[in-house]
Amino acid sequence: MNKNPKPATHYIVGIDLGTTHTVVAYAPLASPDGIRVFDIAQLVAPGEVAALPLLPSVRFHPADGELAASALQLPWPADSGNAGQPPGVIGELARRLGAQVPGRLVASAKSWLSHAAVDRLAPILPWGAPDGVPKISPVEASASYLAHVRAAWNAHFPDSPLERQELRLTVPASFDEGARALTLSAARLAGLPQVQLLEEPQAAFHDWLLRHQGRLDQELAQIRRVLVCDVGGGTTDLSLIDVEPDAAGGSPRLMRVGVGNHLMLGGDNMDLALAHAVEARMGNAPGAPGAPLSASRLAQLMDRCRAAKEVLLAHGAPEQAPVTLLGGGARLVGGSRTVMLQRDEVERLIVDGFFPPVGLDAQPVQARGGIVAFGLPYARDAAITRHIAAFLRQHGPDLPDALLLNGGVFRAGALAQRLAETLGAWRAAPLRLLHNDNPDVAVARGAVAHGLAQRGLAPRIGGGSARSYFLRLDEAKAPGQQANAGQARGICILPRGSEPGHEALLTGRSFALRVGQPVRFQLFSAVAEGAGQALAQAGELVTLDEDALVRLPPIVMVLAADPADPGASNGQPVRQDIAVQLAASLTDVGTLELHCVAQLDARQRWRLAFDLRQPQAEAGGPEAPDPRLAARMAEAIAQIDRIFGTNKQPVSPKEVTQLRAQLERLLGDRAQWTTPVLRQLFDALWQRERGRRRSAAHERVWLNLAGYGLRPGFGDPLDAWRAQQLWTLLPLGVQHPNDRQVGAEWWTLWRRVAGGLDATGQLRLLDDFAFNLQISEEGADGLEGARPVSGSAGDMLRLGASLERIPPAYKSEIGEWLLGRINKSTAASPARQRAGHDSSADDSLYLWALGRIGTREPFHGSPHDVVPPDTASAWIDSLLALDWKRLEAAAFAAVNLARVTDDRARDLPPALREQVLARLHAIHAPAPWLAMVAGKVELDEATERRLLGESLPPGLRLMA
């Protein structure tokens, strides 16, 4: 007899892991008549616990000794609710503490999950927090909220632990596969390995359906299409649901027919807009006229504005509400400032700013000018009505005749009225507004209703996959198909509407996977078809409009070689190709799953996983293959094989040194070599890596071409694998250590590919750089066993300054060393010039390295790794003491240090930027430099080339 049976599943549980709040609802399986909201136990004051229906989705990281352990005691063991994360306060008390102490509150973690331009698995939150504040990743923050919910539930229902219940976790309908996978990772980290994802707008409509279940045929009798508009804290989520009456008079058939693309625009943006307005009226900090609030202080003001907004937009609201920003340090109370917000002012700013009346033909503004802060890429156009117009046109021609609103902002009658009036104007007739009695909990309740619907106990919404998924093909022209110039071809692997559990096997196309070699897949998704296009079916070849599609994280797969394979000799497996087909399905938990299936044995399957840490750079679409280029590429690879291959024909030293010129003769100016061309050359060089050992000339040429072929280390889905292969050379070092030019090419190679290395790899390069730089300048005396790599200090400095993933503390140390050299050199320069020595070249190198190491906008690293603004400001103070007319490099360094990012956690004080701008005007600096300090702009090609040290491959664009 089993004395410890596993706890049974007793409940259907819905969890709304929101940007602002987390809500839990449940229904007993034994009597699922009523859905209840679970009150979540949480700290509301030091030492005081209360169970509340809303758990604020925030964490506060207290300083050592700030709160006694007894003040943080919850009704469960301390380690059961933190998901293995650093100690932190979660919930209502965290929100209150964050309003008092800046820089220690983690907020909007859900928004960060969808921000692919940062490493979402890295400890980056609280964003912009000072040194000494513990940081966690967006995934870990999300996991900690779920772990808190799990601990609270298990304390209340000890016989029905949460991990054993039937769980549904809601996500925005617009979340892509990467964000969904990270959400599931957070759930697993919290001890909830089995959850089903459900889209939030669909959950909100499920809640409405269940509440009107008994009279649904009457409620929906005159309705054919419903727009669900869910404006949460971080996103605006749109879904369309078609209603088909039942001919027999029963319940209508419901089908979700469209969802919107990701739109980071919600309550946080409204709070930020209010905070900007209040900030302008509060006046400035004493002694700092014109100084804006820091990022952490602005976050505090946003929280105060949110509270005032909720008061002023509620039913029966007062005419005004105070917004108070506490002082800092010893002047916590005495330094506080208060502004009175008027109700009509708030309604005007939010109603007219976010819901302006526009026509159905309105297009979202693409030019920059949206609200940007805290490192998050908010939508550039804050007008939600314009985004809705574009969404409805995409899914036209039928317009909705009913509207369901969800989200706390719609408690304001003026917002609901404006949106309903705008939609009514588009269809030239009023539309019905479906009542949502409690938008704060509707999504969690709807998640439970979805579980009931799957049991036949509540109305069901069909629709299957909200997106079609496409695989981009490497060739631009498929058999029997004519591709237009500049357009990519793709194959549909899973059509929109596919039901969960149905697997689409692409039997009409096979792929060859080579053992031990990588294969890449680039996927795209689409929420609707283009104008005049029919829904693509699985296996159908289509032309891809990549600008209208959502690019998913790349998939890279390597089949591990098995030494036990038949035919293997000396433990080395025989290279072989395995013919496979792709199988795609929508899983029961709501995510896309891909497998490679062996054609000869369908039991052999390999699961494909998205690379969620791929640096954010994109290559342009695949070029139409040019038969002439293919022939020239074959000849180019033959030239590489002649120099580095295993052929026995004699090769003269002149042929070795002229290889690059030969390749340019065949392929054109190397500055115009595209990423595909460069990677083919690198692959050919890597396969012949042993050939570099033949002579110093061989090694010089091989290092030069290999580094150039893999630059900047990313941009192609296979680059991470290539970088891993190249990394095996680092312990070996150069093969001709006494040749200084070999050493120079060695350091140049690693500088060029550094963007493809993770933080650990870059730290190893930093050690090598520092070690060899010391030897270069001081000699190897006393360094027993040292095996340095020769090369100039300049080569090493260019590498060190390009390591963007090393911690800011190391960058600060390098910068201080550079400043010391700059100051020493410039102080001695008059005497050196009189003696006939010109140090301007060294000065320019040091200054370039300083600007590169301290740049505000990294090229391949995450923004959280830039040096702190205070450090960059101090460096600029030193640069302002130099003569920029004589040292133009000092001006360029200052430009990179003062570059505007629109992120207050990184941007320098406006007064200092004004000083830089004044000096730039005085020396008649180039217009792009002035623009970089005046506002957020993209780099022009010349500035980009100067900052990187060389140009990027054509077609490769860095995503800021």
Image (cartoon, grey):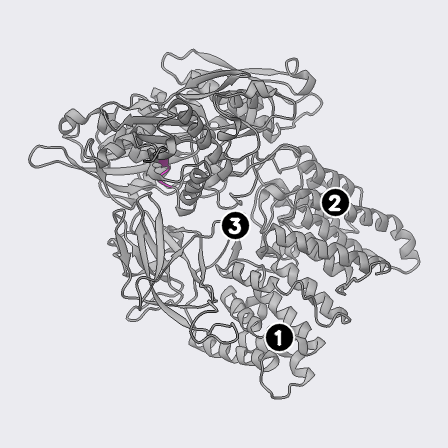
State which region is magenta. Answer: 169-174
Q: Which numbered disc, 2 or 3, marks the residue closer to the eye?
A: 2
* Residue visible at 56% across and 48% down in the picture: 938
Residue 28, numbered circle: none
Q: In this rendering, which labeled residue sits more in front, label 2 or label 1? A: 1
Residue of label 1: 690
Residue named by callout 3: 959
Which numbered disc flags the more N-terminal residue, 2 or 1? 1
Find numbered disc 3 in the image and state the secondary structure of the residue it sits on.
loop
Mark sitting on residue 813: 2
Badge 2, how many Cα within 10 Å: few under 14, some, many 20+? few
Relative side of 333 to 888, left or right: left
The amino acid type found where label 1 is placed reads Arg
Tell me whether the residue at label 2 lies in contact with that at label 1, contact meaning CB atoms closer than 8 angstroms.
no
- Could you tell me which secondary element the residue under label 2 belongs to? helix
Residue sitting at x 82%, y 50%: 821
The residue closer to the viewer here, 821 or 900, is 821
